[in-house]
Image (cartoon, rainbow, N blue to C red):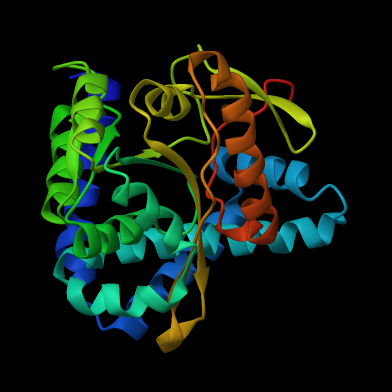
């Protein structure tokens, strides 16, 4: 077994323990444990934390070093909250969860109008807040949606995440290793359903160049291209956390549809999507969990 295989196996076991153990902890104890782990990770300052700090510096270039340190600490705590909620989400009352989320959804009328047209909706979102809660809410209110999952290694870890999200009611299409996911996404849209795609980071190396916080980045053309091919509405969506302790909740903003008149409009639509993302991230930077490289010029 190679070092990579061992690391993958360790990750799989770690996530398995998380889903088994964290849901058994009392909520206050879980919050304390995950906040403490986040603070420890921030102090250690590994590669992911360093990348997060550099990304935040691009989002908030006005901050002093000490302010950027505070934002990074808040960001790592926010990321830890995502995982704490993910481990507990399968055993939560999803009907009650949707009722809690309903008042916090801004712009729901855009999604309702898109679905009423019968051509489906492409909801594009970022790695912010808790996108799994968005999905659980959509399952309760709209009967589910289709999305794409990056194939992880080892296969057991990938399947664990597929099982987790399918248990929430998501339709998961593997990015590789099966039918081309675009076929399943097109089927969903042509049936008038919702497609959700996390779209603030291009994984194909063939993304569309956009201006993102004043610097060049690449974002996937898929959301706009699917909208152009089917007539579905392209709806950017922002996610963030609200409250703390027992008052924890979530906030979501569904933006008005981005015009996509055809495939030649895909670059402009992708830029408009990036602009919507940037506005939400700028308002809630600590809830953007981007621990990967976004800007090619940022070392």
x and y percentages locating residue 281 in the rendered image = 63, 52
Q: Is residue 104 above or below residue 292?
A: below
Locate residue 146: give its quadrant: top left
Q: Is residue 143 above or below residue 184?
A: below
x and y percentages locating residue 296 in the rendered image = 67, 20
Task: Please state which of residues 130 and 232 is positioned toward the viewer in this rendering.
Answer: 232
Q: Residue furthest bottom?
A: 246
x and y percentages locating residue 202 in the rendered image = 49, 24
Q: Residue, x 23% and y 24% (percent of image)? A: 5
Q: Residue, x 17% and y 63% (percent of image)? A: 90
Observer able to see residue 240: yes
Whether residue 62 sits left or right of residue 43 in the image: it is: right
Locate residue 175: give its quadrant: top left
Task: Please state which of residues 66 and 224 is positioned toward the viewer in this rendering.
Answer: 224
Observer able to see residue 299: no
Whether residue 36 sits left or right of residue 17 in the image: it is: right
Q: Residue, x 20% and y 34% (percent of image)? A: 188
Q: Is residue 171 above or below residue 297?
A: below
x and y percentages locating residue 282 in the rendered image = 70, 54
Instruction: Quarter of the image for the N terminus: give it.
Output: top left
Q: Residue furthest front?
A: 117
Whether residue 287 sits left or right of residue 199 in the image: it is: right
């Amino acid at each position: 077994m190679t070092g990579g295989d061992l690391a993958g196996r360790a990750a799989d076991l770690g996530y398995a323990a998380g889903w088994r153990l964290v849901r058994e902890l009392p909520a206050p104890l879980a919050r304390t444990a995950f906040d403490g782990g986040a603070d420890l990770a921030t102090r250690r300052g590994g590669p992911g934390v360093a990348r997060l700090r550099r990304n935040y510096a691009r989002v908030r270039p006005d901050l002093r070093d000490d302010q950027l340190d505070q934002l990074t600490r808040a960001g790592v705590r926010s990321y830890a909250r995502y995982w704490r909620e993910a481990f507990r989400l399968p055993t939560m009352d999803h009907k009650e969860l949707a009722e809690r989320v309903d008042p916090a959804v801004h712009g729901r009328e855009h999604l309702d109008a898109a679905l009423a047209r019968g051509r489906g909706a492409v909801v594009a979102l970022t790695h912010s807040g808790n996108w799994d809660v968005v999905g659980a809410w959509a399952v309760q209110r709209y009967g589910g949606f289709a999305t794409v999952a990056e194939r992880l290694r080892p296969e057991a870890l990938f399947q664990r995440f597929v099982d987790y999200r399918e248990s929430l009611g998501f339709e998961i299409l593997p990015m590789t290793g099966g039918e081309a996911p675009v076929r399943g996404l097109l089927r969903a849209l042509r049936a008038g359903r919702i497609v959700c795609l996390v779209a603030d980071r291009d994984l194909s190396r063939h993304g569309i160049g956009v201006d993102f916080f004043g610097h060049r980045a690449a974002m996937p053309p898929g959301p706009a291209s699917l909208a152009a091919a089917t007539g579905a509405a392209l709806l950017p969506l922002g996610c963030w956390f609200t409250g703390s302790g027992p008052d924890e909740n979530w906030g979501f903003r569904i933006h008005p549809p981005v015009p996509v008149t055809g495939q030649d409009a895909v670059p402009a639509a992708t830029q408009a999507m990036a602009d919507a993302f940037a506005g939400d991230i700028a308002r809630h930077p600590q809830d953007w969990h981007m621990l990967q490289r976004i800007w090619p010029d940022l070392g």
